[in-house]
Image (cartoon, rainbow, N blue to C red):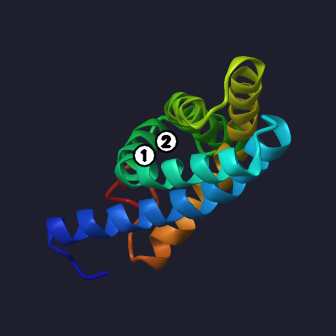
Amino acid sequence: MSQRPPQTTRRTAFFADTTVLLLFFTTTGIINERVIAGMTWEQVLHARLLGAILMVPVARPYGIWRDWLMKRAGESRISQLLWDSMALVSFQVPVYAAIIAFSGASGSGLVQGTLGAALMMLLLGRPYGAFLNGVRKLFGLPPGGDKPMSLNS
């Protein structure tokens, strides 16, 4: 693999992480907001537009957060699943709660939407992480959370 200047690598990582976040969470957000939170289509549209605007500055910091946490994961699928889920829930649930609150969810709808998102993110943590790693590979980047290779590997 050719060496890229650090600025080019950072820019490519920004685009890869942002693409994944936009695609993945626009789809899952619509399902959660309409079905679980019971938001109107107008509220869902508002939440998705606001979400898209907020995803751009949040995507790369989340990618960095996930990479940092995934360095603690072991080789087992269970460890990967747990750390990916912990990364997603700890970073994205508070952001998501603010988005739907600002978009009109309140009371039980806000609580149900936030809990629904937390549950969904627990379940989707690893699929999202695998999707992120796949898109990063397409962009010519290494997957996140890689541990430094030893001289013997």
Q: Secondary structure at mark 2?
A: helix
Q: Residue furthest front?
A: 42
Q: Where is residue 97 drawn, in percent x and y?
A: 58, 29
Task: From the viewer's perspective, tell me whether residue 7 is left or right of residue 68.
Answer: left
User: In percent of the image, x 43 and y 44: which residue is there?
Assistant: 62
The residue where tag 2 is placed is 70
Q: Which residue is mark 1?
A: 67
> Residue farthest to the right?
35
Measure the alpha-carbon separation of dots 1 and 2.
5 Å
Task: Give how far across and how far down residue 95 sits, in percent.
Answer: 50, 34
- Residue shown at 75%/51% (left/top)? 41
Number of residues whose C-alpha sits closer than 10 Å to that of mark 2, classed few (under 14), some (14–19) or many (20 or more): many
Q: Is residue 67 above or below residue 79?
A: below
Name the quarter where the C terminus is drawn: bottom left
Q: Say which of 98 and 71 sits in front.
A: 98
Crowd class of label 1 (few under 14; some 14 to 19; many from 20; radius 10 Å):
some
Looking at the image, which residue sits at the far bottom? 2
Q: Position of residue 102 (x, y in %)?
A: 53, 32
Q: Answer with left or right where residue 136 lies relative to residue 35.
A: left
